Image (spheres, rainbow, N blue to C red):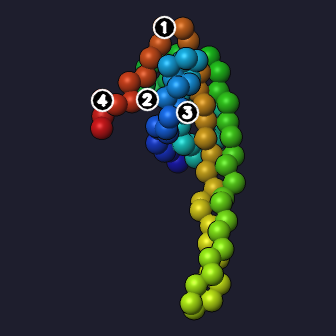
Amino acid sequence: MSILIKPIITEKATMQSESLNAFAFQVNPKANKVEIKKAVEAAYGVSVEKVRTINVRPERRTRHTKTGIQHGKTNAIKKAIVQLAEGEVIDLYTNM
């Protein structure tokens, strides 16, 4: 079971990384805060101060088409916002 799935790179996450030194990751929905902290420290070699988690519910949509009504939804994910110690940095753009 891999804990970290991928980093989240959005405008809001980039602003948090610059101002609060906090980075956002999509994580396994069954992972807890302690496992997330250990996985980030092992993967990036940084010291983590705080971990906040968010369960994002699926987004449901209904479309009216010629063939009838179609229902759909996105996947539910879990996000983790990891705040690093002062002076620590994760460079997410080097492996792209």
Say if residue 40 shows up in the picture: no
47 or 59: which is nearer to us?
A: 59
Q: CA distance from mark 1 to mark 3?
A: 21 Å
Which residue has dot 2 on it? 43
* Residue 20, horizontal then vertical, whole percent: 58, 18
Mark 3 closeness class: few <14, some 14–19, many ≥20 residues within 10 Å: few
User: In the drawing, does residue 9 fall left or right of residue 72?
Assistant: left
- Which badge, 2 or 3, is on the more N-terminal residue? 3
Residue at image mark 3: 12
Callout 4 amino acid = Thr
The residue that appears at 65% across and 21% down in the rendered structure is: 50
Under tag 4, what secondary structure?
A: loop
> Which tag, 4 or 1, sits closer to the chain's start?
1
Q: 93 left or right of 49?
A: left
Q: Residue 52 versus residue 41: which sits nearer the camera? A: 52
The type of residue carrying mark 3 is Lys
User: Where on the picture, by quarter, is residue 71?
Assistant: bottom right
Residue visible at 46% across and 37% down? Answer: 9
The amino acid sitting under disc 1 is: Gly
| Residue 8 location (% of width, % of height) | 49, 39
Mark 2, Cα crowd under 10 Å, few <14 / some 14-19 / many 20+, is: few
Q: CA distance from mark 2 to mark 4?
A: 14 Å
Query: In the picture shown, does residue 95 fall above or below 71?
Result: above
Return the residue at label 1: 87
Identify the secondary structure beneath mark 2: helix
Q: Residue furthest bottom?
A: 67
Q: CA distance from mark 3 to mark 4?
A: 20 Å
